[in-house]
Image: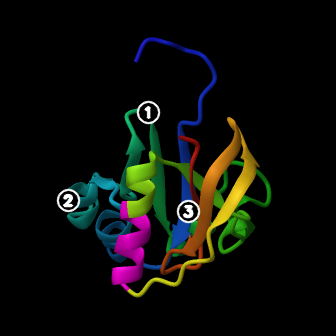
Amino acid sequence: MTDNTTRLDHIVLWVSDPIAAAGFYEKAVGLEPVRLTEYSVGEAPFPSVRVNEETILDLMPRAKAERMRMLPGAAESSGHPVNHVCLSLTASDFDALRSRLEEGSVPVSDVSRDSFGARGAARRSFYFRDPDGNVFEARHYD
């Protein structure tokens, strides 16, 4: 990637079990694990899952919260989730995600229509939670 315009690089989610979280994101959401093997053998501090070629979700173990000293108060952020993270998908990927979640007995919200987002009004969207309680919205614009 050589275009250096402002983009979303990563989001760090607090999770109780990074390996289980990576499994959820791989199987239910369809995101590819990154550094899972390295984390499993103690060579990486946390695993991630890839959203697209330039964005990942880091799966940070809650046990590391006490080591978050980059800013005053950072350690207290553990367990304080963001309101939600929104994944923008194609219409077919949106339908496939909803099907996988329902097949896996993951509760999902009703489908909303024309909700506002970064690219205007999305045709459809819905919400779900990961096993650690992080809330996600899935949407498509096409």
Q: Is residue 43 above or below residue 117?
A: below
> Residue 105, percent across and down?
41, 87
Q: Are the residues at dot 2 and dot 3 in contact (C-beta closer than 8 Å)?
A: no
Mark 2 or mark 3, earlier in chain: 3
Gap in angstroms between the C-alphas marked 2 and 3: 19 Å
The segment highlighted magenta reads 96-104
Label 3 packing within 10 angstroms: few (<14), some (14-19), many (20+)? many
Q: What type is the residue that disc 1 sits on?
A: Glu
The residue carrying mark 2 is: 37
Mark 3 or mark 1, earlier in chain: 3
Q: Nearer the viewer, residue 19 or 104?
A: 104
The mark closer to the camera, 2 or 1, is 1
On screen, residue 141 versus residue 50, left or right, reads: right
The residue carrying mark 1 is: 54
The residue carrying mark 3 is: 13
At x 55%, y 78%, the residue is 108
At x 45%, y 57%, the residue is 94
Q: Residue 77: name its quadrant.
A: bottom right
Q: What type is the residue that disc 2 sits on?
A: Thr
* Name of the residue lying farthest toward the bottom: 105
* Magenta stretch contains residue 81: no
